[in-house]
Every structure is written in structure tokens, then in C-alpha cells.
Amino acid sequence: MENASNSSSNETPPSESLQSLSVSHPQKSLKERFDIVRSIGEECIQEDELERLLANKPQPICYDGFEPSGRMHIAQGVMKALNVNKLTSAGCKVKIWIADWFAQLNNKMGGDLKKIQVIGQYLIEIWKAVGMDIEGGQVEFLWSSEEINSRAHEYWPLVMDIARRNKLPRILRCCQIMGRSEQDELSAAQIFYPCMQCADIFFLKADICQLGMDQRKVNVLAREYCDDIKRKNKPIILSHHMLPGLQEGQEKMSKSDPSSSIYMEDEEAEVNLKIKKAFCPPKVVEKNPCLEYIKYIILPWFNEFTIERKPENGGDKTFKSFKDLTDDYESGELHPGDLKPALAKAINRILQPVRDHFNNDPKAKELVKRVKLQGDKIMRLRSKLTLSLPTQCRVTR
């Protein structure tokens, strides 16, 4: 895989605020380290265990992972870079599990492992370009197919033991981790998936499971397994917030719906258009995706958010806190017509180093071309399959 440092020197550097997060400070107090790590999670199971872990282990192991299954959207790209750099700044080691075998089990890219691995390489390139700190040795990318094959004697007995100790209904409740539901018609491979993901946590010797809220159920399964085998040190669950889609009622960003997502290599004009069309009702803060982008991406990245307005409309204003922003928005002092252009401008600033990398680095350019081509083929195949079905049998997800 090509390192991002080989790209053109004309590339826009990652923001200074993100770079500052990527520097580990040994002099941080226990409280400072705890506050940094805890800030990542919308939920933490359990806080007292997290504090004891940080007090007793100089370099806790954090497990994160992703299923290579298509183009990367901004929630997966920017939020993961922010979270990983926070964890490393607090002295943690982050193991990022490239779940290529899992994507194959979940029938992503038609189950073609080579295509799945191309996507995995593309995702790593994006994280390098956007500013994830991977140079200090505190971040390690591990391909599931390689690691499992090399230590099969450790992995498969663990998977089998987890499967043996759990009833089928309990495993089916974990199907959300694959983007499925208990009502979906699942293959045998997909039923096996939660047992394997649970095993990953112990296989990687993870102290902290740092994944999205949609992965919570399988992480809880891992803690329950500890009870079964009388293991005292349970993995701590740190579940981060899930960004919604850009359209009304979309609780989660969807890679398969371009109007729902901003992709990491989207051009400036594409970002501007998507934000312009995004759901953003005046004076409404709750379930407003534009405000969520500002809370979870823009403010953590830049530590501020600036609105540019004409003097007759109140003039420019810089917000340092989300509360100040929402106070102005709820009162009507801040209008969507001013907020949206500022949001699009901030997102474009974050994404510019990624565009530069994929435009200037020949190998990266070829990689994203292959990913887009593979994605287009899958979408065309889905369309053909849908059109071939009787109208009453078609299901929209």
C-alpha cells in the first residue's frame, strides 16, 4: 500500500487542530487521559473500569474495525481520524481490524475478496491523507484474513466456544452489526458473523472496544462471554455517536444513497450541492443533520465554526461552543441560509488534503478509480435484479 507521504508536496496539510491531537503527551494526568478517551463515546460501559484501566496500564489496546464495502463517507473518514488521534494522544495503542473476511461473509462486493481488499487499501489511503497519525507506531492496521490464517489455532477454538455458549436468538439480536435485522433472511455465514466479531475482541487482546453505537450489541456479547468463562477483566465498551444521513428521517448515513452521504473524495461542488439540499429546518435543533455535522465534525476539528454574513444580516460570527450555536439557531438569529454555506466551506477545508492526494498520487488515483468502477458495477447489478422482480416483491432499503 502506498504511503500518503509519497504524494505531492503541494498537497494541503491536515489541519493544525487535528495534528495537535495526534501528539502523545506522557505528562498528561490520569484525569486528562480519562477525559480525552471518554469524550469519544456517546456511551461508556463502564466508566470506573476505564479509569482503573488507564491508571494501571500505560498503553491500553483499543480495538476498532471496518468492513471494506464501498466508498468512504465523512462519518467513517473524519470521525475515525479524530477518535483515533484522541486515543493515541491519551497513550493508547489502536488496532484497526480490516474485516475483509467479514465483508465476504456479508456478501459485500458480491463476495469477491480481491475487490474487497482493494477497497480496504483505498480506505487506509484516505485516513493517511486526512491526517490520522499512523507514523508513531501507535496505530496498527490488521487484515482479518491474514491474521486469522496465521493464528488459526488460537482463533477458531475461541469462535467455537463463543458459538457453543450462546443460543441462536441471542446471536440473531447482534445482526444489526452487519446492517441487517433479525427479520432478514440470513445466510449461515451471516449468522456466524457475530461469533467471529466477538472473538476478534479477545483475539486482538483489546482492552477497549471503540466502535459505533450500531456495534454495541456484539460488544455486550463479549462482556457476557467474560461472565460465562469467569474472566474478570472485561473489555470496556466505548460507543461513538452515529451521524445521520443528510435527508429528513435518515437516522444513519448510507453509502448506497449518494444524497445521504458526503464521500471523502467528493469534489467541492458536490459537497456544496449536497449541503444545499440537506434537511435543515429553521429554528429546529433536534434531528437536524447539518447541526450534527457541526457538533461532531467541524467543532472537534477546528475548535470553532465561523458564519460569514453581510453586515445588514448581523455580520460574521464565530462560535466556540455548540450551545452558543444552537441558542442562536433556535432563536432564529442564525438562519439555514447562512449556516449551510459555512458548513460546506468547513467540510471542503477538511476534505481538500484527501482530494489533493487522490489527484496528485498516481497509485491513489488508480485506486479510487477502481473503487468507483466496482461500486458502479454493483449498483447496476442491483438495479437489474430489482427490475427483474415482480413489483410486489421489491424491497427498498
Image (cartoon, rainbow, N blue to C red):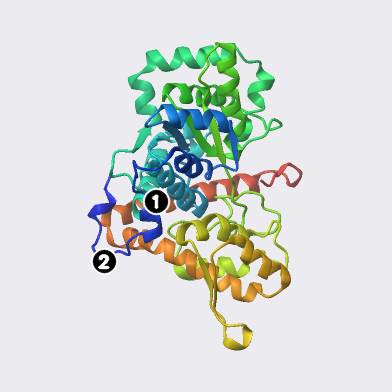
Circle 1 residue: 21
Task: Pinpoint residue 202: horizontal percent, then vertical percent.
Answer: 46, 21
Residue neighbourhood size for the residue with mark 1, other residues' Cα within 10 Å, grouped as few (<14), some (14–19), many (≥20):
many
List the single residue furthest toward the bottom.
Answer: 312
Would residue 137 be visible to someone looking at this image? yes
- Seen from the viewer's position, the closer of residues 365 and 282 is 282
Please give left or right for residue 328 compared with residue 192 in the image.
right
Amino acid on which disc 2 is placed: Asn
Circle 2 residue: 10
Residue at the image position 34 percent from the left and 27 percent from the top: 146
Q: Vertically, is 46 above or below 29?
A: above
Q: Do the residues labelled 1 and 2 touch (CB within 8 Å)?
A: no
Say which label, 1 or 2, has the lower sequence index: 2
Query: Can you tell which of label 1 and label 2 is closer to the viewer?
Result: 1
User: Which image quarter is the N terminus in?
Assistant: top left
Q: Is mark 1 on a helix, strand or loop?
A: helix
Q: How many marks?
A: 2
Residue at the image position 39 percent from the left and 43 percent from the top: 28
Q: Is mark 2 on a helix, strand or loop?
A: loop
In 3D space, how far apart are the residues under numbered discs 1 and 2 (Cα atoms)?
23 Å
Q: Vertically, is 388 above or below 336?
A: above
- Seen from the viewer's position, the closer of residues 294 and 364 is 294
Task: Pinpoint residue 125: horizontal percent, then vertical percent.
Answer: 35, 49
Among the 4 quarters of the image, the one containing residue 353: bottom left
Residue neighbourhood size for the residue with mark 2, other residues' Cα within 10 Å, grouped as few (<14), some (14–19), many (≥20):
few
Amino acid on which disc 1 is placed: Leu
Residue at the image position 45 percent from the left and 41 percent from the top: 33
